[in-house]
Image (cartoon, helix red, strand yellow):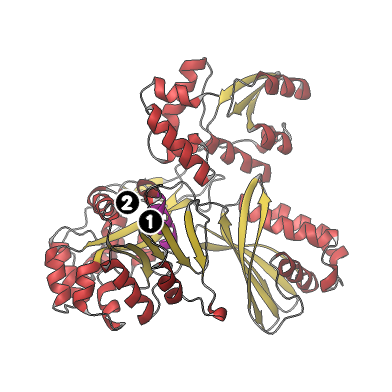
């Protein structure tokens, strides 16, 4: 389907803008459709209306539609993946199918002959297609359990060098495949006395999925070690590795950590998309004044941008998104990371390896001889790294990095504690972004309600602790319900933020070694929104719930 002429003809983009999108599409391994929707050039509904009008084909969104798995499975999963089509409704004689390319007459005829139904084609976006694809795995927990039970009898007693046996391959591949299908960020496989428990982290929360025998677990550990190029016969020391595979027609990398514990070895595997996703700042949850400050900061050619927050708060995603905005042929970008989470085209990415002396500091020193314009340091952990980063920001480079502090104003005293002179911090720091991730409410089942007095009291207490002199406005809010489409009323995550802009007034405070509380107070007087306020705004918009906001920011 010719999306290019459709968008240009209807004045959504120009020819030059399309060329830029084509270049980004190659860099990010994303489709043009994914990019134009992700960048808010056009919404999914608007694109559907365009296609419908142009080709006289109806459009449907499957994003908030509950499908019948039996109808979906009328078309075999393999065919669905090959043709990017989803069956979503049927009558005794006809079958409605969503197609990413509804002008594909050959596919329509093929499905008609194969099913015996009259085919009614509808246009669906790729996002809708991938949501529909999940219905092939409707009872994932039960199916995962059945596959493991079916194979584990034949797997018992296998030795480490026998992990190429089909049952172990099936069990391991099943665990990985369902993690991808369910949108898990991490897989945890933990041995107990007689069995091992498989847990998936979905939207930041761990969920039990299945169990298998402890004998089978030893073979699965060996299989994961082989895939990750680790030592099979090492059971006393922690090991870290990485491997890549293709799941549901998409390349996925797994970062693996294996740790010896009392009953065996724990496997934790993080799922990493093979390429950085085509996020933009708006999609991450930045808005209004905060968004303008970030955009202004990344337009500068010198200085430092810091992102703070605990592990798992989305700091890396924010940095990669900023890098994708800055990644043009005119600049040289170098990164030193531990680990490299996403590969980025035209970005020189270096993996930390402390065993051979390649630390963050060593990588930074080397970069300064590589004629960089932009440098990203995965994390500032020590005085040496902080010192070199500050000096790089002073000498004509834009430096991006992360720091572990609870809020944005806490980044300044943290750097001072590392031994960095306050006047150097004041002259190099451009902006500090503090963030957390909250789960998004499912649009299919969220329910409107009014806060009770207890919740209002908790919020007022948090406001008081954070020095916010505002009254809680008890307008409409929403709460999680739960349906077939989501995980206990939530689906996906979004950031809540606190942006500290380093203005002249803040620079004076930093030079005078002001406390974090003093810096925060002045920043608030100048309009800074704290994380709890940003969270409350998103809760009032129905994006998340009050409970989620309190879960991640409550002191």
Q: Secondary structure at mark 1?
A: strand
Does 543 appear in magenta? no
- Tell me if 160 is positioned left or right of 199 in this view: right
Percent across and percent down for residue 130 are 58, 40
Residue in front for this viewpoint, 364 or 49 = 364
Q: Which residues are magenta?
A: 315-324
Badge 1 or badge 2: first in the primary sequence: 2
Residue in front for this viewpoint, 315 or 459 = 315
Q: Is residue 175 visible?
A: yes
**Rendered residue at 41%/62% (across/down):** 315
Residue assigned mark 1: 495
* Vertical relation: 79 (above or below) 502: above
Q: Quadrant of the C terminus?
A: bottom left
CB-based contact (under 8 Å), mark 1 and mark 2:
yes
Identify the residue at the far top of this view: 56
Our reading of the magenta stretch's main secondary structure is helix
Percent across and percent down for residue 207 are 58, 62
**Rendered residue at 35%/81% (across/down):** 383
Q: Secondary structure at mark 2?
A: loop
**Rendered residue at 52%/57% (across/down):** 342
Q: Quadrant of residue 533?
A: bottom left
**Rendered residue at 69%/77% (across/down):** 265
Residue assigned mark 2: 286
- Tell me if 327 is positioned left or right of 474 in this view: right
Q: Quadrant of residue 45?
A: top left
* Vertical relation: 518 (above or below) 495: below
Mark 1 residue crowding within 10 angstroms, few (<14) / some (14–19) / many (20+): many
Percent across and percent down for residue 428 are 24, 68
Percent across and percent down for residue 205 are 51, 62
Disc 1 versus disc 2: distance between alpha carbons?
Answer: 8 Å
* Vertical relation: 546 (above or below) 105: below
């Amino acid at each position: 389907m010719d999306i290019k002429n459709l968008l240009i003809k209807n004045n959504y983009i120009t020819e030059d803008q399309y060329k830029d999108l084509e270049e980004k599409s190659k860099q990010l391994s994303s489709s043009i459709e994914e990019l134009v929707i992700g960048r808010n050039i056009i919404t999914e509904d608007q694109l559907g209306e365009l296609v419908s009008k142009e080709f006289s084909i109806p459009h449907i969104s499957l994003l908030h539609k509950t499908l019948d798995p039996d109808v979906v499975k009328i078309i075999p999963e393999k065919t669905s993946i090959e043709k990017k089509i989803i069956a979503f409704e049927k009558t005794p004689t006809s079958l409605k199918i969503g197609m990413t390319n509804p002008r594909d007459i050959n596919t329509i005829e093929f499905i008609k002959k194969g099913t015996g139904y009259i085919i009614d084609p509808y246009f669906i976006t790729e996002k809708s297609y991938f949501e529909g694809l999940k219905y092939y795995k409707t009872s994932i927990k039960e199916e995962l359990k059945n596959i493991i039970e079916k194979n584990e009898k034949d797997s018992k007693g296998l030795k480490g060098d026998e992990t190429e046996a089909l049952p172990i391959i099936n069990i391991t591949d099943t665990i990985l495949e369902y993690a991808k299908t369910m949108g898990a960020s991490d897989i945890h496989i933990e041995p107990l006395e007689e069995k091992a428990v498989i847990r998936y982290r979905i939207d930041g929360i761990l969920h039990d999925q299945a169990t298998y025998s402890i004998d089978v677990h030893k073979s699965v550990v060996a299989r994961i070690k082989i895939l990750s190029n680790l030592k099979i016969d090492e059971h006393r020391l922690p090991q870290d590795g990485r491997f890549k595979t293709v799941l549901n027609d998409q390349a996925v990398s797994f970062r693996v950590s294996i740790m010896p514990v009392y009953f065996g070895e724990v496997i934790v595997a993080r799922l990493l998309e093979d390429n950085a996703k085509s996020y933009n700042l708006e999609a991450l949850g930045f808005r209004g004044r905060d968004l303008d400050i970030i955009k202004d900061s990344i337009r500068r050619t010198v200085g430092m941008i810091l992102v703070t927050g605990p592990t798992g708060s989305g700091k890396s995603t924010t940095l990669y998104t900023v890098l994708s905005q800055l990644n043009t042929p005119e600049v040289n970008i170098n990164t030193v990371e531990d680990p490299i989470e996403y590969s980025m085209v035209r970005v020189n990415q270096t993996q930390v390896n402390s065993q051979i002396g390649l630390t963050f500091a060593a990588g930074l020193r080397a970069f300064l001889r590589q004629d960089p314009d932009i440098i990203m340091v995965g994390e500032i952990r020590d005085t040496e790294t902080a010192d070199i980063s500050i000096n790089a920001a002073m000498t004509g480079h834009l430096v991006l990095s992360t720091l572990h502090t609870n809020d944005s104003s806490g980044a300044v005293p943290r750097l001072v504690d590392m031994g960095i002179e306050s006047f150097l911090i004041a002259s190099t720091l451009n902006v500090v972004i503090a963030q957390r991730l909250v789960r998004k409410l499912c649009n299919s089942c969220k329910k409107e309600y009014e806060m009770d007095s207890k919740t209002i009291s908790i919020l007022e207490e948090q406001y008081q602790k954070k020095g916010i002199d505002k009254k809680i406005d008890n307008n409409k809010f929403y709460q999680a319900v739960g349906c077939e489409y989501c995980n206990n009323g939530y689906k996906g995550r979004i950031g809540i933020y606190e942006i500290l802009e380093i203005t002249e007034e803040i620079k004076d405070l930093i030079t005078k070694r002001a406390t974090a509380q003093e810096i925060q107070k002045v920043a608030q007087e100048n309009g800074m929104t704290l994380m709890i306020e940003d969270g409350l705004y998103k809760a009032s918009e129905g994006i998340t719930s009050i409970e989620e906001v309190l879960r991640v920011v409550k002191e």
